[in-house]
């Protein structure tokens, strides 16, 4: 991995555990290139040395996840599994096994809307190239190899990939990297926040996070106060290709094989950054009405949808987020779901 790093160290007041006067600590702010995007972190510790150590531990944790999961690298463990002959039993590392078992849970909980076995569809639409629109026959052929519950055959600590199935990490790898970075901070007694390509997470602190207009990533339209866990947003503002005059969204619906309809964006909060990453993709794939219905049944998931309606943006948030979310632009209409019942007269 090419690591381009900028580090800033500053004094910071950290509350002492057993003293009336605050202890002097240090805050390290750092930016690096990782997993094809940018990682920005700010970590606070009791000393400059420990803050620098925590900064480096977070970056190493992200690099380890990238080395295990990145399908942009032929030498990653997941790439080697994808390259193994169909039916060949491959012994997995403890970490990759845990990753794939988590994927199975997310797939089941999301009604199949989250599915990392979309590699055949990614190739059919050439999402890693210039983009193309496959024929119906090509799409049908690619769809035959989508379905995470059918992609792998498990045999104890070993797994075999079934013929035609290709796994992708794009909807969960970044979240897993954030979780491992936060684990490193917990071990070191650090606190701070990370912004990894637009997914934010905090540990022992709070941030006022801004959700962007799905039509213009530079324009913040909703403020979301976060004091634990992670927020992940899925939309097409950053990505998308044009082939033959047709815009191709990068979020594929594993049920249809086609790009999910682009209504705006879906933002999900979970304590686990990997869960937030997976479920924001699932919510976008499900679409507004089904996503709100699904999220209402998930006690550990909070959902915000931004829907483009003409010149306006409709922000729909779960009722539990009331007081944590506020509009930042006059063209944003904020509503909460479910709506409050009418008051008796």
Image: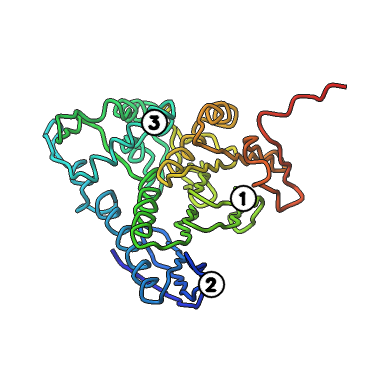
Q: Nearer the viewer, mark 2 or mark 3?
A: 2
Q: Quadrant of the C terminus?
A: top right
Q: Where's residue 68, x and y in %?
A: 25, 51
Estimate how packed mark 3 is, as few (under 14), some (14 to 19) or many (20 or more) residues with alpha carbons within 10 Å. Answer: few
| Mark earlier in primary sequence (1, 2) | 2
Q: Is residue 190 left or right of residue 298?
A: left
In this rendering, the count of numbered labels is 3
Q: Where's residue 27, x and y in %?
A: 47, 72
Locate residue 334: give its quadrant.
Answer: top right
Q: Nearer the viewer, mark 1 or mark 2?
A: 2
Q: Is residue 310 above or below residue 149?
A: below
Determine which residue is flagged by label 1: 224
Q: Which mark is residue 340?
A: none
Measure the C-alpha gap from mark 2 to mark 3. Answer: 65 Å
Estimate how packed mark 2 is, as few (under 14), some (14 to 19) or many (20 or more) residues with alpha carbons within 10 Å. Answer: few
Q: Is residue 9 above or below residue 192?
A: below
Q: Residue furthest right?
A: 345
| Mark earlier in primary sequence (2, 3) | 2
Q: Which mark is residue 135?
A: 3
Mark 3: secondary structure:
loop
Mark 1: secondary structure:
strand
Q: Which mark is residue 22?
A: 2
Q: Where's residue 229, x and y in %?
A: 48, 48
Query: Looking at the image, which is closer to me, 102 or 189?
Result: 189
Mark 2: secondary structure:
loop
Q: Where's residue 155, x and y in %?
A: 14, 29
Measure the C-alpha gap from mark 3 to mark 1. Answer: 42 Å
């Amino acid at each position: 991995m090419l690591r381009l790093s900028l580090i800033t160290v500053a004094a910071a007041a950290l509350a002492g555990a057993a003293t009336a006067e605050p202890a002097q600590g240090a805050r390290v702010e750092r930016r690096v290139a990782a997993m094809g995007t940018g990682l920005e972190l700010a970590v606070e510790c009791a000393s400059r040395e420990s803050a620098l150590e925590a900064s480096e531990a977070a970056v190493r944790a992200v690099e380890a996840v990238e080395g295990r999961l990145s399908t942009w690298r032929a030498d990653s463990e997941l790439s080697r599994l994808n390259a193994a002959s169909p039916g060949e039993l491959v012994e997995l590392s403890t970490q990759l096994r845990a990753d794939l078992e988590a994927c199975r849970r997310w797939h089941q909980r999301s009604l199949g809307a989250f599915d990392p076995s979309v590699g055949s569809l990614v190739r059919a639409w050439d999402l890693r190239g210039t983009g193309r629109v496959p024929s119906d026959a090509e799409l049908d052929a690619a769809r035959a190899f989508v379905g995470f519950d059918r992609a792998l055959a498990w045999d104890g600590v070993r797994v075999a990939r079934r013929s035609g199935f290709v796994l992708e990490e794009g909807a969960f790898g970044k979240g897993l990297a954030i979780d491992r970075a936060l684990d490193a901070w917990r071990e070191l007694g650090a606190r701070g926040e990370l912004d990894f390509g637009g997914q934010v997470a905090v540990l022992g602190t709070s941030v006022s996070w801004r959700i962007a207009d799905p039509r213009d990533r530079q324009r913040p339209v909703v403020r979301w106060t976060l004091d634990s866990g992670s927020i992940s947003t899925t939309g097409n503002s950053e990505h998308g290709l044009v082939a033959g005059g047709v815009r191709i969204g990068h979020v594929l619906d594993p049920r249809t094989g086609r790009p999910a309809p682009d209504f705006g964006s879906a933002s999900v909060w979970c304590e686990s950054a990997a869960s937030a990453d997976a479920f924001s993709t699932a919510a976008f794939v499900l679409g507004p009405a089904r996503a709100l219905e699904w999220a209402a049944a998930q006690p550990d998931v909070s959902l915000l949808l931004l829907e483009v309606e003409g010149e306006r943006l409709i922000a729909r948030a779960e009722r539990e987020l009331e007081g944590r979310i506020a509009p930042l632009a006059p063209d944003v209409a904020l509503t909460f779901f479910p709506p409050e019942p009418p008051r008796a007269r």
